[in-house]
Amino acid sequence: MRVTIADVARAAGVSKSTVSRVLNAKGEVDGRTAERVRDVIGRLGYVPSSRAVGLARGRSRTVGMLAPSLAWPWVAELVQGAVDAVEAAGYGLLLFTCSRGRESMTRLAAQVSANAFDGLLVVEPETETGAVAAMHRSGLPVVLIDDRVRHPGFPSVATTNTLGGRQAAHRLLGLGRSRPLVITGPRRFDCVRERLEGFVRTMEEHGAGHDPRRTVEGGFGERSGEEAVARLLAEGAGFDAVFAHNDLSAMGALRALRAAGRRVPDDVAVIGFDDIPLAAYTDPPLTTVRQPLRAMGGAAAALLLARIGAGPPDGLPDDIPDGDRVVLPTELVDRASAPGPVLTP
Amino acid sequence: MRVTIADVARAAGVSKSTVSRVLNAKGEVDGRTAERVRDVIGRLGYVPSSRAVGLARGRSRTVGMLAPSLAWPWVAELVQGAVDAVEAAGYGLLLFTCSRGRESMTRLAAQVSANAFDGLLVVEPETETGAVAAMHRSGLPVVLIDDRVRHPGFPSVATTNTLGGRQAAHRLLGLGRSRPLVITGPRRFDCVRERLEGFVRTMEEHGAGHDPRRTVEGGFGERSGEEAVARLLAEGAGFDAVFAHNDLSAMGALRALRAAGRRVPDDVAVIGFDDIPLAAYTDPPLTTVRQPLRAMGGAAAALLLARIGAGPPDGLPDDIPDGDRVVLPTELVDRASAPGPVLTP
DNA sequence: CTGAAAGCGCTTACAG
DNA sequence: CTGAAAGCGCTTACAG
């Protein structure tokens, strides 16, 4: 039924070894012979069985990717970036999701033990990093993406959180706002601390200072943004801007401001973080610090492939250091909730 | 290094055949022997190599999934639904994306020829259905999801588009609106024709009729919704509601209405289709006809696994006919852009 | 430059 | 109930 290397060998009048050589361009093969073999391969439409190749070589030309639910747009973007890069290298991407909790991890672990793929891309598992660490120790190449908590033991891809905070601050300073409300994510995340630090430092450098009472810890959800603004408003805290640590909480802030009759950006300018697709559709559209999610997914894949020894087709892009930690730049996306001008640093 | 079935056999003092038997619960094995073998397996942490098993059995316990870009939220939802179901069955999901166009298809075709997976889930490829058909003919089990154009030759999963149109019409009738603007998707899609037909028919059944001049063909993008509303408004066409064939164009309609100073829902009620996550965040939140995307992804996976003979763990859910075409029900999601009451059909 | 043979790690008749 | 052997479809030393 299926045409095998033996069929090709027979039809071409050579041994399987020779067919294998022309297939993999390995070792010397006579020009005519090679051509003849290639002819037969074409005529028979022969494609090596990936299973057999995998078994013989001990590699599967497949990488795994573990991600939280794809329902989160930023996760989907990361995965898309990874898929593209992996595919371009002629690899396959086996997708795993944490959506079923502990059982998902068990399934993943089983596939790891079964050697189903050559390396694993991991999108910040908040829990279960122990399981991932175990896989890593057992010899599986692993690359982390956007680790909210830094794991020194792993190669990883992140983004410039501190710079992102600075970019937000610069924009607000440029707008003449000096009393911002900051709605952070959970403090236990490194990215949160970095965003806050970059923001506060820049404010201070420009003589604006920052009142810690105007910093509220949120949970990255829409609700926390809404509540923070509503509460501060009720307390009579004066603020002329909001810097939210992600777009969802920025959206909550927008909602609360609208409910309170405050105009955005006239009364209060608002800046988010992430640049999820939603950000372009809020009212007003959200100015935000963009994380290059696709590029991050792609960079992580490139890093992993390099480690696996896959030799990415075009090598790593020039702007990605070939180190253990790739950090891609954030970028301020200019929209109506906090329109320019930019104060150049 | 890696522990193999031979290691287990040796340590347990039996043959590889016996280990294989207890592994797969196939054939008779003495109780004590089996227990001893299981012990050793546990102690050694043995897990069969998926590559070797795959080669020996001619199956990979992996399914492929071809989808357009994950950047579209509805695609991400479908994939998530499929991942969950596939994983629950102990299978892996190899993800392919059309994002690189023709080359993506070539890569996919190569993997198909290489027998990298046992079956393929396909999310409506607008072009390239020829390629998919070819794979199907060559013996690969294929299940289509949400086929915008019906392909009689394939098992598929779709949604009740006609009913969805009726649901939208009922809601508008319940609100006393009788002069709706309909912004469709591209007419070449079956789903578009069905949504329109269900909608118009219901209007007519309730004596409302429908003026074809108030039907505008859109492209499923935000822009087309915005432009349609702006144009009809400029032409002075009177309408008291909008039924958009997807949420994005409904969002465009909302924008245009706001720009024109029309109040939603007081002046114009708006209903979308899909229920993407965005829909809950528009201003006002969007009433929409929900497609059960996760369930569709899951149903498609179940259908495919059944075909592969994987015997899904819990069988097909009761409400999914075990036929060649699964059609899941749409559902009206009640939000502020077209609030109840519902006119019961 | 080319081929015969062993090996990758399992499964599956076939004997017993 | 159990084992020896062949086979899945490749790759890779090893000879020549």
Image (cartoon, coloured by chain):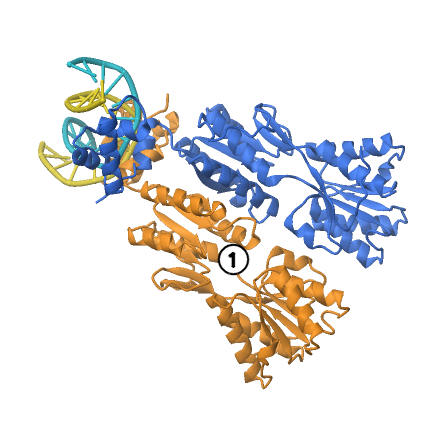
Chain colours: A orange, B blue, C cyan, D yellow
Q: How many marks?
A: 1
User: Hey, which quadrant is residue A44 in on the image?
Assistant: top left
Question: Label 1, on which residue?
Answer: A293
In what quadrant of the picture does the N terminus of chain A appear?
A: top left
User: How many residues crowd around disc 1 within 10 Å: few (fewer than 14), some, or many (20 or more)?
Assistant: many
Q: Nearer the viewer, residue A157 or B38?
A: B38
In what quadrant of the picture does the C terminus of chain A appear?
A: bottom right
Residue positioned 71% across, 63% down in the render: A255
View extreme (front): residue: B32
* A256 versus B106 height, above or below: below
> In this view of the protein, can residue B268 be seen by the observer?
yes
- Give residue A45's position: percent from left, percent from top: 39, 28
> In this view of the protein, can residue A338 be seen by the observer?
no
Compared across the picture, whether A20 is left or right of A192 comes to left
User: Hey, which quadrant is residue A262 in on the image?
Assistant: bottom right
Compared across the picture, whether A141 is left or right of B298 comes to left
Compared across the picture, whether A74 is left or right of B159 comes to left
Residue positioned 41% across, 31% down in the render: B113
- Give residue B264's position: percent from left, percent from top: 81, 53
Residue positioned 77% across, 34% down in the render: B166
- Give residue B313's position: percent from left, percent from top: 46, 31
* B332 versus A192 height, above or below: above
* A61 versus A260 height, above or below: above
Residue positioned 84% across, 34% down in the render: B203
State which chain disc 1 sits on.
Answer: A
User: Hey, which quadrant is residue B24 in on the image?
Assistant: top left
Q: Secondary structure at mark 1?
A: helix
Q: Amino acid at mark 1?
A: Leu
Q: Nearer the viewer, residue A192 or B103?
A: A192
